[in-house]
């Protein structure tokens, strides 16, 4: 059989039509189209296979992008999926929410040459969604069950990626989380319009089907101490994320209708999941018909403004103290928000909240950018006498997150942290100063990205595996 004929068999899994007939070409295209949509075909074929895969280098997971694009262009979608999932525990999630303009796509050679990037994220999403539809995504099938167990605190992307990798190696895994649903910020932080909740929930179900135990509504520090969990498991991974909202201490801060971003986003996500949310139903944590002001310029702020638009706010303004070029949020997200009707008020900082009981307006200062500070960014400086009023009946503060005081919360004062409050780990082993206790994700890096949390979870799983294997050898020697 010739190579071409073999290809027909692979794509269509059926006997190729006879050579030299009209029907032959038509059938090939039909088979091809059945396997791969027109857009995916067009996009994957655009990859120039340049040989210097900057896209791959700039993907935190070093995804083998050129190869899975090539397989997709050839209609070999199952192989593309197998390759894609071999480096990423949630390709369909990253495909949807990675800031690709800062990572893979921003570094695509075609983008650099001015012809527009290959839409790598959409392709990654397409390949894995297609795999789910076709039943190619299967629960973990453990061949070699082990006696050792790992307790994972936190069911966000870092905890879930580590759980999957360790379970594949046969360890018994229990994931503890203080929320009622697994997923961390994937479920209650990131809005549904960016990441459909069913996409997260089907992943959790898959992990459960693979034998991972989930203990929800279980807060470490309240329902058990870290020491108690250490006694129960052979190793522990802390993957609790960062949740302490940064504050703006301004006059009028205690007025009603001023909310931290997570309260607003969690209420909206819970509502989308069909939960009863009293504060939303009563119109309190709900932007409908209101003049909303969001303070902040990161991705969380973008999620708040775009959620407010979807809740049919009367107007939505985003106040940011630097200019557009210096916004920390993804440029694509800012463009999306602008397109949807959000008004950005650059170089502006809130000075005071005004109102009777409820917030009614903000007094804001205009800012100019001065000399660079120690971080290298130009320092925002208030322009004296430039203040003015902005109308608002709902204010959302999205100024970023810091870690909670984990040593105190976990009743484990000896757990070492950095000066930023993140957990201090050995750079190579990801182990904390407590033997057999590892840490990964935002609680180590500070607020970051899902793709980095997955990478950390995978690395931590590898480190825990090595630790457990060493322990096993020691124990068997003693025995
Ligand atoms: C609003 C918002 C939007 C974002 N948008 C994006 C985006 O578009 N793209 C992107 O890449 N990144 C985005 N991020 C960042 C991304 O969500 C995080 O970097 C990522 O989720 C971190 O993963 P993690 O597993 O470390 O922590 P998390 O996802 O925060 O998960 C931690 C889990 O630990 C649990 N936990 C905490 N303390 C305890 C305890 N004491 N006991 C038991 N359980 C506990 C929590 O309930 C939570 O489920 C966004 C973040 C926010 C806040
Ligand atoms: S994981 Fe993120 S950075 Fe990596 S290829 Fe996918 S979308 Fe790009």
Image (cartoon, rainbow, N blue to C red):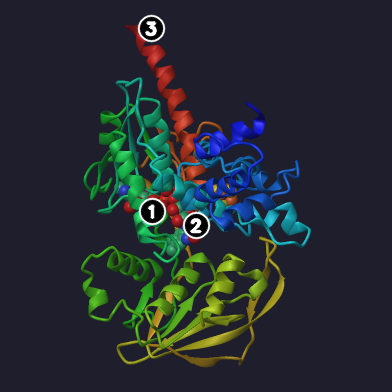
Which comes sooner in the sequence, label 2 or label 3?
Answer: 2
Which comes sooner in the sequence, label 3 or label 1?
Answer: 1
Of 158 and 296, nearer the camera is 158
Residue 199: mark: 1
Q: How many numbered marks have been drawn onto this rendered protein structure?
A: 3
Q: Mark 3 points at which residue?
A: 477
Discs 2/3, front: 2
User: Would you identify the image quadrant in which residue 328 lies?
Assistant: bottom right
Q: How far apart are marks 3 and 1 (CA)?
A: 46 Å
* Quarter of the C terminus within the rendering: top left
- The answer to whether one can see residue 436 in this image is no
Report the residue that reaches farthest toward the right: 113
SS class, disc 3: helix
Of 247 and 147, nearer the camera is 147
Q: Distance between the residues labelled 2 and 3?
A: 48 Å
Q: Mark 2 points at which residue?
A: 96
Relative placement, left or right, of 169 versus 425 is: left
| Mark 2 Cβ inside 8 Å of ligand 1 | no
SS class, disc 2: helix
Of 138 and 385, nearer the camera is 138
């Amino acid at each position: 059989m010739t190579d071409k004929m073999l290809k027909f068999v692979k794509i269509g899994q059926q006997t190729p039509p006879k050579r030299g007939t009209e029907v032959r070409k038509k059938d090939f295209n039909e088979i091809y189209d059945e396997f791969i949509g027109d857009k995916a075909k067009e996009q994957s074929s655009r990859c120039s296979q340049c040989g210097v895969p900057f896209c791959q280098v700039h993907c935190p997971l070093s995804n083998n992008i050129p190869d899975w694009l090539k397989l997709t262009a050839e209609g070999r979608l199952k192989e593309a999926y197998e390759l894609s999932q071999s480096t990423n525990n949630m390709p369909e999630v990253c495909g949807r929410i990675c800031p690709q303009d800062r990572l893979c796509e921003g570094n695509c050679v075609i983008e650099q040459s001015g012809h527009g990037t290959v839409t790598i994220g959409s392709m990654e999403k397409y390949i894995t969604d297609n795999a789910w539809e076709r039943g190619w995504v299967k629960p973990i099938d453990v061949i070699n069950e082990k006696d050792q167990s790992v307790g994972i605190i936190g069911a966000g992307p870092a905890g879930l990626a580590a759980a999957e990798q360790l379970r594949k190696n046969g360890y018994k895994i229990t994931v503890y989380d203080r929320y009622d649903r697994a997923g961390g910020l994937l479920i209650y932080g990131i809005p549904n319009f960016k990441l459909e909740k069913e996409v997260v929930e089907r992943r959790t179900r898959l992990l459960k089907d693979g034998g991972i135990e989930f203990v929800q509504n279980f807060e470490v520090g309240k329902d058990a101490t870290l020491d108690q969990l250490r006694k129960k498991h052979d190793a522990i991974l802390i993957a609790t994320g960062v949740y302490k909202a940064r504050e703006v201490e301004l006059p009028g801060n205690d007025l009603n209708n001023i909310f931290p971003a997570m309260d607003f986003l969690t209420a909206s996500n819970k509502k989308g999941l069909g939960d009863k949310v009293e504060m939303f139903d009563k119109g309190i944590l709900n932007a409908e018909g209101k003049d909303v002001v969001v303070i902040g310029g990161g991705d969380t702020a973008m999620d708040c403004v775009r959620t407010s638009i979807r809740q049919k706010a009367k107007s939505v303004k985003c106040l940011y103290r630097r200019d557009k070029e210096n916004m920390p949020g993804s440029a694509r997200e800012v463009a999306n928000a602008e397109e949807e009707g959000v008004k950005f008020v650059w170089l502006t900082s809130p000075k005071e909240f005004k109102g009777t009981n409820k917030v009614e307006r903000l007094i804001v200062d205009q800012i100019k950018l001065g000399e660079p500070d120690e971080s290298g960014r130009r320092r925002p400086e208030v322009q004296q006498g430039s203040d003015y009023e902005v109308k608002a009946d709902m204010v959302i503060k999205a100024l970023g997150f810091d870690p909670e005081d984990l040593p105190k919360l976990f009743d484990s004062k000896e757990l070492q942290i950095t000066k930023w409050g993140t957990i201090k780990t050995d750079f190579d082993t990801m182990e904390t100063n407590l033997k057999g206790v590892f840490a990964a994700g935002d609680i180590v890096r500070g607020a970051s990205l899902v793709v980095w949390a997955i990478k950390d979870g995978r690395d931590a799983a590898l480190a825990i595996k090595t630790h457990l294997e060493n322990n096993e050898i020691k124990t068997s020697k003693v025995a």
